[in-house]
Image (spheres, helix red, strand yellow):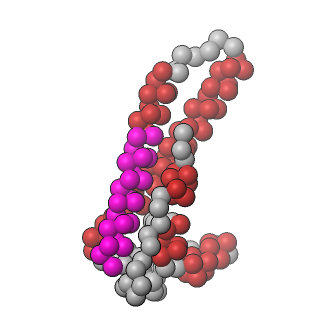
Amino acid sequence: METQMDFIENYPAYKPSKNEEYMSPAMLEHFKQKLNAWKTQLIEEASSTVSHLQRDSDTPADPSDRASQEEEFALVLRTRDRERKLIGKIDKSLNDIQNGDFGYCRVSGDEIGLARMEARPTATLTVEMKRKQEIREKQGVA
């Protein structure tokens, strides 16, 4: 099964034309399609997980097998919870496309950059601002 990172890595990158303006209508349409496809994939994987958990929910008699099954289920559920949060970020990014904020840093207002948006289409900070945020978090300053 493809993971979300496989999906991002395999999705074709946008190739801007010469002198194309940053976050042009064509570029925004590319990211809208990419985000919607990613969201659809995550929703399909979540549905598949529900089916898997329902199919394999019989409790094994052996305590070791039962512990392994519980650990597997816990891991799957943690992964799906992270993906649920990611769907929220995707929705926020789709909203940002609609209101003209997509691709711009929410702190500085600077362009985040096409390469970073391709790698992480839900990014809301430039690399520099993200680094500063992480330093503040490590220092215990929110």
Judging depth in this view, the residue of 28 and 53 nearest the camera is 28
Identify the residue at the far top of this view.
Answer: 61
Q: Is residue 73 left or right of residue 83?
A: right
Q: Which quadrant would the N terminus be assigned to in this image?
A: top right
User: Residue 3: percent from the left, percent from the top?
Assistant: 54, 47
Residue positioned 35% across, 56% down in the render: 36
Against 65, residue 37 (above or below) is below
Q: Which quadrant would the C terminus be assigned to in this image?
A: bottom right
Count how many numbered circles sit on residues in the image: 0
Judging depth in this view, the residue of 51 and 77 nearest the camera is 51
Residue positioned 64% across, 32% down in the render: 71
Identify the residue at the far left of this view.
Answer: 98
Q: Does the stretch in magenta take in 100?
A: no
Residue 35 visible in the shown view: yes
User: Residue 80: percent from the left, percent from the top?
Assistant: 50, 43
User: Residue 56: percent from the left, percent from the top?
Assistant: 53, 21
Identify the residue at the far right of this view.
Answer: 64
Residue 141 visible in the shown view: no
Q: Does the stretch in magenta take in 38?
A: yes
Residue positioned 42% across, 53% down in the render: 38
**Magenta span: helix, strand or loop, mainly?**
helix
Residue positioned 49% across, 27% down in the render: 53
Q: Which residues are magenta?
A: 24-45
Against 14, residue 74 (above or below) is above
User: Residue 23: percent from the left, percent from the top?
Assistant: 37, 78
